[in-house]
Amino acid sequence: MNQQETQQYKVLPILFAMLLSGFIGLFGETALNVALTPLMELLEVGPTTIQWLTTGYLLVLGILVPVSGLLLQWFTTRQLFTTSLIFSIAGTLVAAMAPSFEMLLVARVLQAVGTALLLPLMFNTILVIFPVERRGSAMGLIGLVIMFAPASGPSISGLILANLSWHWIFWISLPFFIISLVCGLMFLPNISKLTKPKIDVLSIILSTLGFGGIVYGFSSAGGHGDGGGGWSSPVVIATLAVGALSLLVFSIRQLRMREPMMDMRAFKFPMFTIGLILIFICMMMMLSSMLILPMYLQQGMAVTPLMAGLVLLPGSLLNGFLSPVMGRLFDKFGPKWLVTIGLAIVAVVLFMYTRIEPTTSLGMIITMHIFMMIGISMIMMPAQTNGLNQLPPAYYPHGTAIMNTLQQVSGAIGTAVAVSILAAGQLSYLKGVSNPESPESQLAGFTSGVQHAFIFALVLCLLGFVISFFVKRVKVGAQQGQQGPMH
């Protein structure tokens, strides 16, 4: 039954439509990172305000992705796919023509709605259309998109900014969304079974307050770090407290409901939980270093946005190409060694990053970044696939919703904490010098802050390394036994 069902799907065009739109959506998540400095001048706003182009985007993802498990059970695959792409296309079009910061922010919110609907749908579709033994390779392709798109954002937008205006970052994305939409409308069938569970309004409110509060609190703390408000600001403390409390009540409520919005019982599966923790750590390390490194290249080492993008390109490209390879290695050997060795490699690189100086050669930084990206490709995909493989099909929408939510939240937390540590390190260094205003002191202070931020990433990595020893391969045979009656 399972095999025949699998064969009926036109797997390649479905994959193409999903992966292309996912790639462009996630590319948009980081494409503006390199452009934020020039955009402050062009749109006449300060650093705390410009940060909202990223914060707003992450906030919408943090609020919508948790609800996606519910949406997957209420709306057909085609309805969700079409809606997601209409939002993405509308957002990209508004951004491409945006005359002001406010319009650009609205555009980012529209784009984020599109991406938030698409990500869980992409995972869920692949879990359904691929048999378990080929899932590693398929998830490898998703890995390629999830890792390579945000990683290539700064490089590609650096190239665009060197030759064209920032609007072109969006004009260039637009045709790809349209191609994905057409391809999806032609080939994508309705894959998931609609169970239409009861919609619990309180759960949606708690989830929105919880995930929204956490993302907003951390992002604000990171954004205000340079202004000295940071973590002690009443707004930050209040939103984090509301977020944490709402999440606690949300979790207790989900466990008590017969038809939960996000089924927390997925955490009963130990490999799913370990996989989640590893992905959380991995995304925090990756996104914080991907924010700090281009900043240091531009401000500390005085390279152009284009050059900063190019320095990060080889590692990002390699990471993208390695993801499917890791998928095949995973199908063959399982996750354990891949994950442990990957974390060891990343730990060594992060240790070297804590010694970064303005005199460090670009060649050295490129080499370190390449090794870091190799390590990350060994961690993410195996941890993700192994975790999801342990879930019975009834949990797929919930498992993918939990995983995607945590990825988005981890991004917000990682970048916020890194920026705060950077600002605090810089501040404490400047307090101890006689002439804090001089360019030399400013540069040395900034370097010290960056080194501190990488120490934070290193500590996270070492924690992941310890956890990786508990990873076990999920027995596929047993899983299929579980799956049998569900089809």
Image (tube, rainbow, N blue to C red):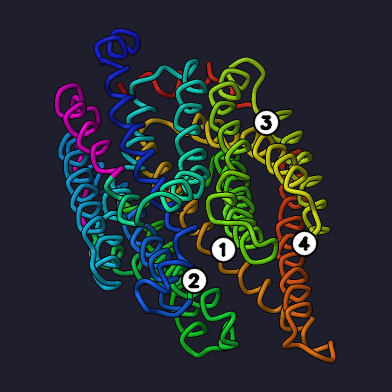
Quote the CA–CA distance across marks 4 and 3: 42 Å
| Label 1 sits on residue | 415
- Tag 1 secondary structure: helix
Quote the CA–CA distance across marks 1 and 4: 22 Å
Q: Three-letter amino acid code at disc 2?
A: Ser
For the residues labelled 1 and 2, say whether their Cβ atoms are less than 8 Å apart: yes
Tell me the residue at 71%/48% (across/down).
Answer: 464
| Label 4 sits on residue | 358
Mark 1 crowd level (few <14, some 14–19, many ≥20, 10 Å Cα): many
Tell me the residue at 53%/88% (across/down).
Answer: 233
Residue 311 located left or right of residue 87: right
Mark 4 / mark 3, whichever is N-terminal:
4
In the rendered image, the quadrant that contains the N terminus is: top left
Mark 1 / mark 3, whichever is N-terminal:
1
Mark whose residue sits in front, 3 or 2: 2
Q: Which mark is residue 472?
A: 3
Mark whose residue sits in front, 1 or 3: 1
Mark whose residue sits in front, 2 or 4: 4
Instruction: Residue 293: give x, y in percent of width and height.
Output: 64, 56
The region drawn magenta spans 172-199
Tell me the residue at 30%/9% (across/down).
Answer: 7
Q: Quadrant of residue 207?
A: bottom left
Mark 3 crowd level (few <14, some 14–19, many ≥20, 10 Å Cα): some
Mark whose residue sits in front, 4 or 3: 4
- Tag 3 secondary structure: loop
> Which residue is at the front of the view, 297 or 404?
297
Quote the CA–CA distance across marks 1 and 2: 8 Å
| Label 2 sits on residue | 219
